[in-house]
Amino acid sequence: MAQKNSLAERPPMGWNSWNHFHNKIDDASVRAQAEAMVSSGMRDAGYTYINIDDTWEGERDAKGNIQANSKFPDMKALADFVHSKGLKLGIYSSPGAKTCAKFEGSLGHELQDAQTYAAWGIDYLKYDLCGLREEMKTAPTPEAAHKIMIDAYTKMRDALRSTGRPMVYSLCQYGEDAVWEWGADVGGNLWRTTGDISDKYARMAEIGFGQAGLGRFAGPGHWNDPDMLEVGNGGMTTDEYRTHMSLWAILAAPLLAGNDLSTMTPETVALLTNHDVIAIDQDAAGKQGDRVSAEGPVEVWARVLTDGSKAVGIFNRHSSAMTAHVDLQKLGFTHAVKAKDLWQAKDMGSINTSYTVTLPGHGVLFLRLSQ
Ligand code: GLA
């Protein structure tokens, strides 16, 4: 029986340290991110979680309690600070003895760690498989290895729940073993469906466009997670970052910024806080969209929204501009369609169901359409 914790009714929005900072994250930079999330307008746009990823962990004390390392002198005080900004604090661990970056994991200390997180005031846990693979390797059969993993995720779910403190439970499992089929049953509010993203169009596109068919496994409280955002990290063009944001919104993906919020350009802020795009991602029905058609490098993806309108992305995966003819009848529209161009924030009035568009290389036309 799936046990829900009634958190993450919409895909979680926030920030995570990994994509930009990797192991160079400390108390001061986390505070700076929280401050920037407020001053940039991101908090008001819906971003809430400030998530510390791997490399915060220190040694256990004599009683086995996990302690933060010297980069995080007082985790409780940090949580208080983040909360004082109207934000929430997330943390990271692994069901294995070690994390991916070879820091202390939670194996054998699950309940103790959940209690420590609760005492610190943590609101979100990303639980990253990595180190548990050592244990899984010792299993006699693939089925037995699978059971070790399921048991480990279930154990932390129960540990978190027993603390009485609501904590979003984020499974990081890279999409192996069809995690979307069992992620909700082990209490996951979200589960990574892929390996790690990088700040390059090719990798982002491989992940984003690779999500076709997964929509039926997601919904309010339990989301597919195609990994954190790279917007603002500098490795993609503006058109490519628009593709990234548009796809993630259609996919009802968690929007976890992965850049340095304290040094953002106005253009990055605009990409991350586009009100119309966020509204698609956070649409209350929580119906993940899917690919409708692919014609060479041009793909049309659509998502049904609560009010009956549709978010439609017309994507050009080619590196140079392409002209595409789109038949909106394939999206269920029978006559002229009311359209808004979400990136241009432009009401387009009515458009024909047979619609021709020129798309920039690696770019997107992101529309909200209603009959
Ligand atoms: C894995 C995860 C990343 C990040 C690192 C930290 O690679 O997929 O998102 O958490 O571990 O070590």
Image (cartoon, grey):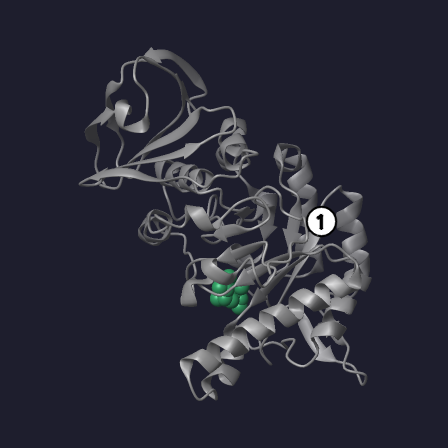
Residue pictured at 81% horizontal, 83% vertical: 63
Residue pictured at 39% horizontal, 16% vertical: 371
Is residue 94 depicted above or below 224 in this figure? below
Residue, disc 1:
88
In this orientation, which residue lies closer to the viewer: 132 or 105?
132
Task: Report x, y in % for residue 103.
Answer: 60, 76
- Rendering quarter of residue 360: top left
Give the SS element for disc 1.
Answer: strand
Is residue 266 depicted above or below 214 in this figure? above
Amino acid on which disc 1 is placed:
Lys
Task: Report x, y in % for residue 352.
Answer: 27, 14
Q: Is mark 1 within 8 Å of ligand 1?
A: no
Left or right? Give the position of 343 relative to 334.
right
> Which residue is outermost to the front?
1
How many numbered marks appear? 1
- Rendering quarter of residue 364: top left
Q: Does residue 153 appear in this view?
A: yes
The image quadrant where one finds the N terminus is bottom right
Is residue 78 depicted above or below 243 in this figure? below
In this orientation, which residue lies closer to the viewer: 148 or 282?
148
